[in-house]
């Protein structure tokens, strides 16, 4: 009987040590589908894929990600004036690319929760091409006139992002919840500091495979992602 109990205890210990830590969120590969939205432009929302890799070493971890998103949208606007009416019809082709490198450390609170503190650098690039026409109707004192202006232009914008964030991570059975806050400094033509808040809900299907929905808001833009993760 004693030998049976000892064998069961050894087997259980071996099983537990072979499972990934419930409160751990390092050492994984992740593929996600994401939507990018801007605070001051509601019509344009690039969508695409995000690839993330995370590896832990020496009590710290490094995480890198690459996001490629695009949107193609037609925008029509009509403005009535006292002397002229302006009808604008434009087709926007938007490509968004972002590359991020993070370094962080996790502090276990208990078997089910931890605090994750991390910071890093991101490079964002936005390429916008637009074409269309501006149709202006006006009265010259004698008759109605129409002026049509054709547009075919583009613009590229790049910005550097530096951020420091902290998140609380809690796991209950196979469900995982994550809440975080931080700040992000954006440097382009005009630099600004923005508050960041984030939330994530995940579910673990097996010891290695899980899925999550994550939301991150940095005031001037926000992202919503559905991700599939493989932990190793």
Image (cartoon, rainbow, N blue to C red):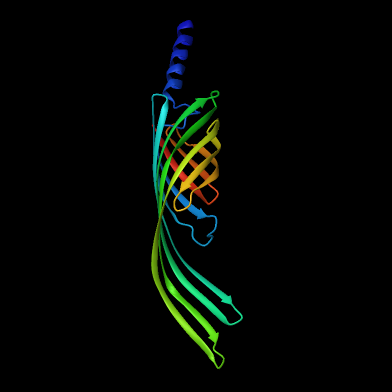
Residue 137 in the figure: left or right of residue 47: right
Q: Quadrant of the C terminus?
A: top left
* Residue 7 versus residue 209 in the image, above or below: above
Q: Nearer the viewer, residue 230 or 90?
A: 90
* Residue 10 versus residue 133 in the image, above or below: above
Q: Position of residue 24 (x, y in %)?
A: 47, 29
Q: Is residue 27 visible?
A: no
* Residue 230 versus residue 114 in the image, above or below: below
Q: Residue at x 45, y 45 (%)?
A: 161
Q: Is residue 72 visible?
A: yes
Q: Nearer the viewer, residue 53 or 122?
A: 122
Q: Quadrant of residue 198?
A: top right
Q: Nearer the viewer, residue 189 or 66?
A: 189
Q: Position of residue 55 (x, y in %)?
A: 38, 32
Q: Position of residue 142 (x, y in %)?
A: 55, 93
Q: Residue furthest front?
A: 190
Q: Residue furthest top?
A: 2
Residue 85 in the figure: left or right of residue 187: right
Q: Residue at x 51, y 88 (%)?
A: 145
Q: Nearer the viewer, residue 112 or 160?
A: 160
Q: Residue furthest right?
A: 82
Q: How many marks?
A: 0
Q: Residue at x 54, y 36 (%)?
A: 178
* Residue 153 versus residue 187 in the image, above or below: below
Q: Position of residue 188 (x, y in %)?
A: 44, 51
């Amino acid at each position: 009987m004693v030998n049976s109990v000892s064998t069961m205890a050894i087997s259980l210990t071996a099983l537990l040590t072979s499972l990934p830590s419930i409160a751990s969120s390092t050492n994984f590969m992740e593929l996600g589908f994401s939507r990018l939205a801007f605070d001051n432009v509601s019509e344009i929302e690039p969508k695409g894929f995000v690839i993330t890799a995370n590896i832990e070493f020496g009590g710290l971890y490094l995480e890198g990600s690459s996001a490629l998103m695009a949107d193609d949208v037609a925008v029509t606007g009509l403005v009535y004036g006292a002397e002229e009416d302006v009808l604008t019809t434009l087709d926007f082709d938007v490509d968004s690319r972002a590359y991020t490198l993070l370094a962080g450390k996790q502090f276990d609170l208990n078997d089910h929760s931890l605090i994750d503190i991390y910071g890093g650098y991101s490079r964002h690039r936005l390429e916008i091409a637009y074409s269309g026409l501006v149709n202006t109707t006006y009265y010259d004192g004698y008759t109605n006139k129409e002026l049509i202006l054709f547009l075919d232009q583009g613009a590229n914008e790049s910005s550097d992002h530096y951020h420091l964030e902290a998140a609380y991570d809690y796991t209950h059975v196979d469900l995982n919840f994550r809440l975080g806050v931080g700040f992000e400094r954006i440097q382009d033509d005009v630099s600004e500091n923005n508050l960041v808040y984030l939330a994530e809900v995940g579910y673990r299907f097996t010891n290695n495979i899980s899925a999550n929905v994550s939301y991150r808001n940095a005031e001037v833009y926000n992202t919503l992602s559905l991700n599939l993760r493989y932990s190793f």
